[in-house]
Image (tube, coloured by chain):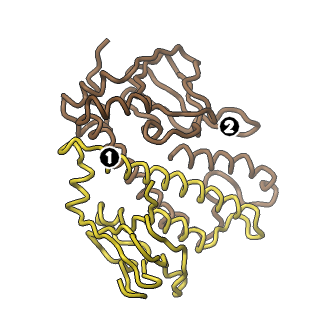
Chain colours: A brown, B yellow
Amino acid sequence: MTYSMRDVRLFESFSDLDRADLLKFMHEKQYVAGDTVCSRGEPGSTMMVVVEGSLSVVVPGKDNCPSEIAHLDRGSVMGEMFCIDPAPRPVTVVASEPATILELGRDDLTKMRQDAPRAAAALIGAVFSETLRRMRRLDDRVERELFVRERTGPLLSHGGTSQDESSRADLPEPWKACFARLRGSA
Amino acid sequence: MPALSFLCQEGQITDLCFVVTAGSFEIAKIIDGRSCTLDTSGPGSILALMPALDGAPCSVSMRALAEATVVEITRATLLDLVNAAKTSDTTVVHDLALAGIRRLRQSTEDLGRALYRALQSDRSGHISPLDFAKIQSATHAWQAP
């Protein structure tokens, strides 16, 4: 099957030629509903683009039950940083329905830098811009939400956790999920 | 740069970023009316990259602790480097992306740790402004890979 990937935001600045070159280095993978695409903690070195179906991003929630923190539809990109800097996966991703993804690994990117440098440059530039955008979002979040919250009340009043003493025994799980969400955003 | 001179002050808009080649810089922020030192950055650090690229005001101040040397990079040059497709040379943008990814991951971990410390503290749920500011400053001082 052929894909254009014109609807993928990360690749919106790509020329048609860059997109076509990128596709030559990507590998198609198909999943049935319930399949695990990647697991939290396992080494990750690939970027994935959802081209059909959808995926669910989960982290351990209360009593280690999976808690969905994001849903990835067609055109979503996941793990774009991992093909530049491999790291353990911060989240688990499962197929919510039959899904097809295109994957680009670190080795593919290395080969792409040699054989299709224009497309590789476009991709790395796009990942860099996305990293900056997330960094600015983190910076703004610290400035607006958290810094202000320090002056207005406990952080735990945010995110569905009550402030009374009786809820404190339950805090570790929501906080674990909170950390996982933070890591997921990176 | 003479000792105690500022590269960039909190709130200032700059179209320059700086690579530290010698000496070190104090990263500071005004908290509750006082200037608090958050970190120091030495050779290899890339300072004020985000403000230079996106035009937002610098959220921290950067001051030379002693005589120091930096390389200035203008926004126009940065944009040319980032838009590597023009030259098909991916080296610089790859290294910048790598530095940014590591900085983002580290800042996220730091935020997680600050949240956890807040949970453990007597004032459960409160994170100290200094902890917040340290995380924020880290997003402005990248380390070259």
In the figure, residue B62 lies in which quadrant? bottom left
In the image, is A91 to the left or to the right of A15? right
Between B82 and B57, the one lying in front of the other is: B82
- How busy is the neighbourhood of tag 2: few (under 14 within 10 Å), some, or many (20 plus)? some
**Is the C-beta separation of discs 1 and 2 under 8 Å?**
no
Residue B79: image location, x then y, percent: 23, 55
Give the residue type at disc 1: Thr
The residue indicated by pointer 2 is A60
> Image height check: is A162 above or below A119?
below
> Image height check: is B39 above or below A20?
below
In the image, is A116 to the left or to the right of A36? left
What residue is at 49 percent from the left and 53 percent from the top?
A: B104
Is residue A34 among what the camera can see?
Answer: yes
> Image height check: is B35 above or below A97?
below
Q: Residue B91 carries which label?
A: 1
Give the residue type at disc 2: Pro
Between A5 and B45, the one lying in front of the other is: B45
Between A177 and B37, the one lying in front of the other is: B37
In the figure, residue A66 lies in which quadrant? top right
